[in-house]
Amino acid sequence: MPKHTKKRSTIKRKHRRMKQHAEANKKDVGKCQTPK
């Protein structure tokens, strides 16, 4: 089973979500995720 294809699509989705979360976190920090 090719893992790369699945992983790549997942990462793309994750990155897109991270971007949204990052913008939201700028307004209220640490609501959804805890900053590293």
Image: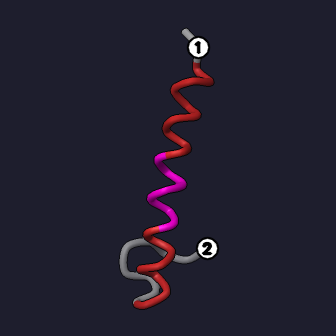
Image quadrant of residue 28?
A: bottom left
**Left or right placement of residue 1 versus residue 24 in this view:** right
3 up-or-down from 11: above or below: above
Q: Pinpoint residue 23: horizontal percent, then vertical percent.
A: 47, 78
Which quarter of the image is occupied by the N terminus? top right
Residue plotted at (58% across, 20% down): 3
Residue plotted at (51% across, 66% down): 19
Residue plotted at (44% across, 82% down): 30
Q: Which residue, given by chain and number where applicable, does mark 2 sit on?
A: 36
Q: Residues within 10 Å of mark 1 (few under 14, many from 20)?
A: few
Mark with earlier residue (1, 2): 1
Callout 2 secondary element: loop
Main secondary structure type of the part rendered in magenta: helix
Q: Say which mark, if any, is on residue 2.
A: 1
Q: Which residues are magenta?
A: 13-19
Which quarter of the image is occupied by the C terminus? bottom right
Q: Which of the two discs, 1 and 2, sits closer to the camera?
A: 1
